[in-house]
Image (cartoon, rainbow, N blue to C red):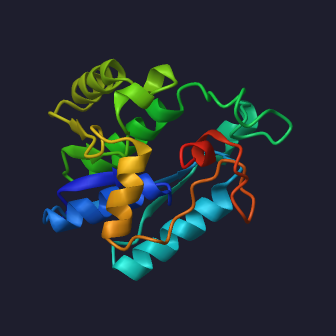
């Protein structure tokens, strides 16, 4: 039924990925993970609205909010600095493990996520090496070949914004603070500057 699972946060990058997959006739199942992030409600609302508007499948929803209650970072705890304390250990690995489990359960071998150019990576779990080793670990743990695809890997945020505008994508939420109006100060907001 599906060709891929797409890790989707409701942000611009993953919403663009879902659109690009559809254009390529790839049937993608969105997977959303509540890891206890400060902006969970706004992210989930944006993803739900985007899926309804674009007629994407209803997302798989994981509630791992306990992760953010235990693993404190600027993304999970408002008492910490949203930028300086933003690194959330194993966050992207958790996403890919859960995406891999959904993929396997659906008979799918492809996981898509919205990583941008490695030149913009600021954390160790955003590198090409991380993607390659995680792909190998998922393949080994599941006993089937799993492939991780990053269709935006050659792009910067400015490239993504331009392409999204061309495609008429306007329903998304990309602020780590979780405020009604984007804070303009977090890593996600600063990417748009």
174 or 96, nearer to the observer? 174
Q: From this view, report whether residue 125 is shown above or below residue 193.
A: above
Residue 169 point in image, percent of width and height: 40, 70
In the drawing, does residue 141 fall left or right of residue 15? Answer: left
Q: From this view, report whether residue 35 is shown above or below residue 9.
A: above
Q: Residue furthest front?
A: 193
Residue 189 point in image, percent of width and height: 62, 48
Which image quarter holds the N terminus? Answer: bottom left
Q: From this view, report whether residue 100 is shown above or below residue 132.
A: below
Q: From this view, report whether residue 184 is shown above or below residue 171.
A: above
Query: Can I make out residue 151 in this image?
Result: yes
Image-quadrant location for residue 77: top right
Residue 186 point in image, percent of width and height: 68, 42
In the drawing, does residue 108 fall left or right of residue 182? Answer: left
Residue at x 75%, y 59% (from the top left corner): 179
Image-quadrant location for residue 134: top left
Query: Can I make out residue 31 in this image?
Result: no
């Amino acid at each position: 039924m599906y060709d891929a699972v797409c890790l989707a946060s409701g942000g611009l990058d993953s919403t663009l990925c879902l659109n690009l997959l559809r254009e390529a006739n790839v049937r993608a199942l969105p997977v959303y993970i509540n890891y206890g992030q400060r902006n969970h409600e706004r992210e989930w609302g944006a993803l739900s609205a985007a899926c309804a508007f674009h007629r994407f499948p209803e997302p798989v929803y994981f509630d791992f909010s306990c992760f953010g209650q235990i693993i404190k970072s600027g993304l999970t705890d408002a008492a910490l600095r949203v930028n300086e304390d933003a690194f959330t250990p194993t966050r992207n690995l958790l996403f890919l493990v859960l995406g891999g489990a959904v993929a396997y359960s659906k008979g799918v071998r492809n996981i898509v996520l919205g990583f941008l150019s490695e030149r913009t990576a600021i954390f160790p779990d955003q590198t090409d090496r991380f993607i390659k080793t995680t792909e190998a670990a998922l393949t080994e743990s599941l006993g089937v070949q799993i492939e991780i695809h990053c269709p935006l890997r050659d792009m910067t945020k400015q490239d993504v914004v331009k392409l999204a505008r061309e495609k008429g994508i306007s329903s998304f939420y990309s602020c780590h603070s979780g405020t009604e109006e984007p804070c303009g100060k977090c890593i996600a907001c600063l990417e748009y500057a």
